[in-house]
Image: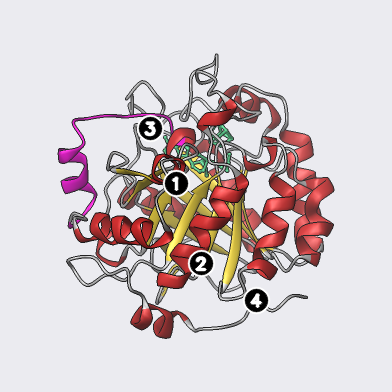
Amino acid sequence: MPPLHLLPAAESAERSALVDPYGRAITYLRLALTDLCNLRCTYCMPARGLPKLGHSALMRYEELNRLLAVLISAGIRKVRITGGEPFVRKGSMDFIRALPRRFPRLTSVNITTNGVDLAPRLGLLKKAGIHNLNISLDALDRELFHSITRRDQFVPVLETVRSALEMDFHVKINVVLMRGVNENQIPAFVDWARREKLTIRFIEQMPFNASGENDTFIPAREILQQLRREEPALSAIPGSATAALYSAPGFSGALGIIAAYTRTFCGSCDRLRLTPTGGLQTCLYAAPQLNVRDMMRAGATDGEILAAVKKLIARRGRDGFEAEKKNNGALPSMAQIGG
Ligand code: SAM
Ligand code: SF4
């Protein structure tokens, strides 16, 4: 296994040159490789998909590697590859697999995927030292999965989750919980966490679906009530950050709630996001304020890029509400921001 060791989080935060006005060290980059996807989740994008970007609009792999080198030199220690669906981009596996060796100062390389094209890649990812997979699965029922994602891919995705668990990947399941849509799946999900060593995280729905609708949103506190109805002995696992985590006696796995819309975790947010077209965002709710693709193509040096990133972080708002206010209500698809 390649060396994926290095600085413990606290030490890396201390050394980060990327610190916002509220003292939060930015150590985590979420990198969206593409906005294309092989599913069409109703909460994320319209049935027809998103307008296709020209190939040259995307950050090239060389540009991504250059940006990573700059950001890692300044304190980024954790990377999550996301999208759109990362594996639909040609060449994504070669890029992802090379990351741990190319950047040994990274403490982890993680992937968020819908799992559709993951199965044949599991062995290679393991070999590359990539162990953390977040797999989105909003229902444990084939028809409901089909109606949410607009594609009939439930069986292969579930099989892939099972294979990943057998291969000892750290698997987190992401469930966007929606009123009247998949609430009835809670008992099956809770039971799954009871039996299997995985973490199932229920995400508050956000209005990032290219239409701005959020009618089926369920707040985190209500999600917790629903989970407790299913398992009254649930207790909080201390020390969790973005996701509030819970477990109960007899559970092999854990449950989590991500208050993505009510935004109760902004105080400890350590993230920077890169959109597929090179936009850097200091918050999910902020508009991309700096385009590193354009800077690179205009001939900027690494030093100039780093200076611009630092300036961006120095203007970071206190929380997602402040960022949203400045953003004039732009509500793209999550696939365009990199969820
Ligand atoms: N395609 C991959 C996937 O679905 O896992 C990666 C990209 S997707 C945009 C990343 C995460 O964002 C997924 O877990 C998805 O469920 C979540 N997501 C997408 N749209 C969302 C929304 N409107 N509200 C909350 N979460 C959303
Ligand atoms: Fe695709 Fe992921 Fe968006 Fe679903 S949530 S449409 S899988 S990018």
Residue 135 visible in the shown view: no
For residue 32: magenta?
Answer: no
* Residue 333 in view, yes or no: yes
SS at mark 1? Answer: helix
Q: Position of residue 213 (x, y in %)?
A: 33, 24
Give amino acid for label 4: Leu
In front: mark 2 or mark 1?
A: 1
Give whichever of discs 2 and 3 has the lower sequence position: 2
Mark 3 vs 1, N-terminal side? 3
Q: Dot 3: what SS?
A: loop
**In the image, residue 326 lies in the stretch drawn in magenta:** yes
Image vertical order of residue 194 relative to residue 91, above or below:
below
- Crowding at dot 2, Cα within 10 Å, few <14 / some 14-19 / many 20+, comes out as some
User: Quick one: label 4 or label 1, which is nearer the N terminus?
Assistant: 4
Q: Is mark 4 within 8 Å of ligand 1?
A: no
Residue 126 vertical position relative to residue 175 in the rendered view, above or below = below
**Real-space CA distance between mark 3 and mark 1, rounded to the nearest whole angstrom:** 28 Å
Residue kind at label 2, given as amino acid type: Lys
* CA distance for labels 4 and 1: 28 Å
Q: Which residue is mark 1?
A: 296
